[in-house]
Image: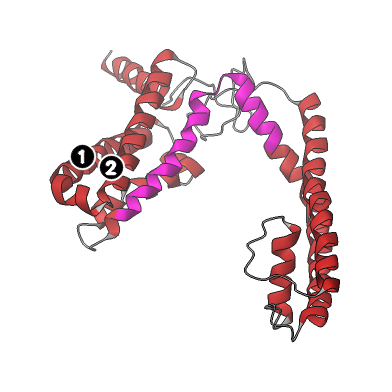
Amino acid sequence: MQTTAKKSWRQKLYEIIYEADTPAGKWFDIVLLLLILFSIVVVMLESVPSYHKHYGAFFDIAEWVITIIFSIEYILRIYTIKKPSAYIFSFFGIIDFLSTIPKYISLFFAGAGILIALRALRLLRVFRILKLSPFVGEAQGLSKSLKASRAKISVFLLAVLILTIILGTVMYLVEFGHGSGFDNIPKSMYWAIVTLTTVGYGDIAPVTPLGQFIASIIMILGYGILAVPTGIVSAEYAKQKRQNTPKNTQVCPNCHAVNHQDGAEFCYHCGHKLNETSM
């Protein structure tokens, strides 16, 4: 009887902490995100000398309270899952650990507390709250699109690199000696990259008529170059969207696998029953 009660309590904790599909799970993640946001605001305000002088003690107490809460949450995540290593070495597990330890490190190393800003990474959990399958489906589709496009984008980037070398060399030959800042080829390549990406810092600019003409061509060319990777990813995304199936935020209590299909009863990775914690 006691074992059954223990299982029930552990199962409830598991569903609250790991499942964003349940009302309790969503509220848990929402409160967690609010704490993260509050912590980040505290870190930012603490960096302002006048605020630190007047409210330093409050900021320190607030950070310790939040750190303790996150430490308890981290321990509960380990406790409620069958294989703790599955969570500890997962993406979110590593982020949770890195965003929790800075305050403890600050006890031994002065100034290490600023690393608490790493908690901003935990905001990635917003995708669990917004899980509602359309968001997860779109996120998965985008991820697959980027992976499917990597070969084409790599070839494109290589072509752009070659083009940058050529344009940088040409501008060096045209502008060198005119006091325009094109003192060497690497510096000229930097200008070509800035111009092709339409950033245009203005720290280097051609002064000769021929150089300005070439620069105009490069600027126009830049708009077309920026559109190429967007088109590649968009095409793959449209393809993935046609094949995409709804996902949910269920986390396997056995192997910590995520991205299960909506309505799935068993883990696609290890076959363990979902929403059930085995002891």
At 80% across and 65% down in the image, what residue appears?
A: 215
Quadrant holding the N terminus: top left
Query: Which numbered mark, 2 or 1, is in the foreground of this view?
Result: 2
Q: Which residues are magenta?
A: 114-142
Expressed as whole percent of the image width and height from the top left, the position of residue 181 reads: 67, 78
Residue 60 in view here: yes
Type of amino acid under label 1: Ala
Q: Quick check: can you spot residue 252?
A: no
Cβ atoms at labels 2 and 1 below 8 Å apart: yes
Identify the residue at horizontal 50%, vertical 44% (top origin).
91
Q: Which mark is residue 62?
A: 1
Query: Under tag 1, what secondary structure?
Result: helix
Give yes or no for residue 119 being in the magenta stretch. yes
Q: Is residue 185 above or below residue 199?
A: below
Q: Which residue is mark 2?
A: 42
Q: Nearer the viewer, residue 9 or 205?
A: 205
- Residue at image coords 38%, 44%: 119
- Residue 246 in the magenta stretch? The answer is no
Give the CA separation, mark 2 to mark 1: 8 Å
Rendered image quadrant of residue 18: top left
Q: Main secondary structure of the magenta part?
A: helix
